Image (cartoon, rainbow, N blue to C red):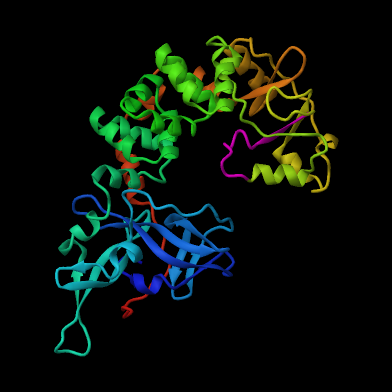
Amino acid sequence: MAGDVIYAFRVMRLPLLDAGGAAIGRLEDIVVIPGRVGEAPRVLGFVAMSQRRRIFVNAARIGSLDNEGARLRSWDVDLNPFKPRRGEVLIGRDLIDRKVDDETVSDVALRAAGDGRQTWWEVSKVRLAQRSALRRRPSYRLLDYDEVPSLFSMHAGGEMAVEAARLRDMHPSDVAGVVRSLPLAHRKQLAEAMDDERLADLLEELPEAEQLRIIEGLDTERLISVLEEMEYDDLADLLAEMPGEQRTRILDAMDDEDADVMRRLLAYPDGTAGALMTPDIIILGPTATVAEALAEIRDPDWLVSIAAQVFVVQPPFKPPTGTYLGVVHFQRLLREMPSTELGRCTEQEPTITPDIAEREVAERLASYNMLSVGVCDEVGHLLGAITVDDVLDRALPAGWRQRRRSGAPAAATARVRGQATRPSTAESGGQSR
């Protein structure tokens, strides 16, 4: 499909189709990121109106883009409202009707491109219109994207903002590999350009010493916003490495409930189950239904290891909970009727206390083939859970992340360059405004 062209003005009126071909919305804009030197700007995704919401659809989730519309590869849709980010350029909002000297941008041509393994869409041409008092109709001319390079860079918010946008949809582990290859000054600039959630994901993939260097210099308000996006167990590890005065200042500035959780976690000695535990797990009562449990598991904000099971307790339903009753695994939920109460399908699995050693936690998970294990106090109240990924993180030799990423930057960069749609068919020719 490399070389096929479709014009943005036409794309921004196409329907958004689900995997079965049914219309579920309409495209309104196209999000691109400026390319590196010698590279064309790439399509990062599309802004669509669906169920009265403006949402972002990652280009990699589009299976085909043609006259019929933009068709999704799968059935699920992220309905979180679209929020423009620094480093991104919206063709409709930022470029169409933009003045370039005495001409106006009337359209942008997108070309399907590929490297033999992946395909994507990139900016190919920019169409400029010029009006004259001597002519009734405007005159048009097509320019290559690199003939008007400032058109894209002037709206991107700086090189580090653009780099942050390029890394937007990479796995946090791969982003960490890219970041580790940068000088410290550039790491800090990139961190400042990232949104809070993305920066939190990055911090969770770095050793605590590197986390502290990256966040050094962030103002307190921004720092708190980032830290509150981190998983509780990772945040506890970071706070434990901070000087006491800084840790106290951060805890005092945090939300009261979150600060209380962190103080409880920090009270457990390093090397114990309590220090590995997260209280951020799915907890429901015995009268909750399978349908309610599945609805909770569908929340994309849950980690895969957390969403693999639901812990069932007596109220209250926040750690420390009432009496722990058991667990219902995802597969069991799929086999039960939606109206079945969890109390009727709860399984009894062994739990641990927060004072046992990390090695015992690993042995318990291995012995019972569990993805996570509940942590209870001496009277049977659920305090949280430990997931197998956190146990592996501690069990592997020191410095494993750095060795694993020794070749990551190049590979990760290649992934960024390939993150876009896999076009099936396209159209040629333009659409006048």
Residue 248: x and y, percent? 46, 16
Which residue occupies 31% across, 78% down?
430
Residue 79 left/right relative to 38: right
Judge whether 352 appears above or below 2 on screen. above
Residue 184 left/right relative to 241: left
Residue 358: x and y, percent? 58, 13
Q: Main secondary structure of the magenta part?
A: loop
Which residue occupies 57% across, 36% down?
303
Which residue occupies 35% across, 73% down?
9
In the current view of this chain or complex, which residue is farthest to the right? 344
Q: Which residues are magenta?
A: 299-313
Q: How many marks?
A: 0
Where is residue 350, by image quadrant? top right
Judge whether 203 appears above or below 37 on screen. above
Asked if residue 273 shows in the view, the reply is yes
Q: Quadrant of the C terminus?
A: bottom left
Nearer to the camera, 134 or 179: 134
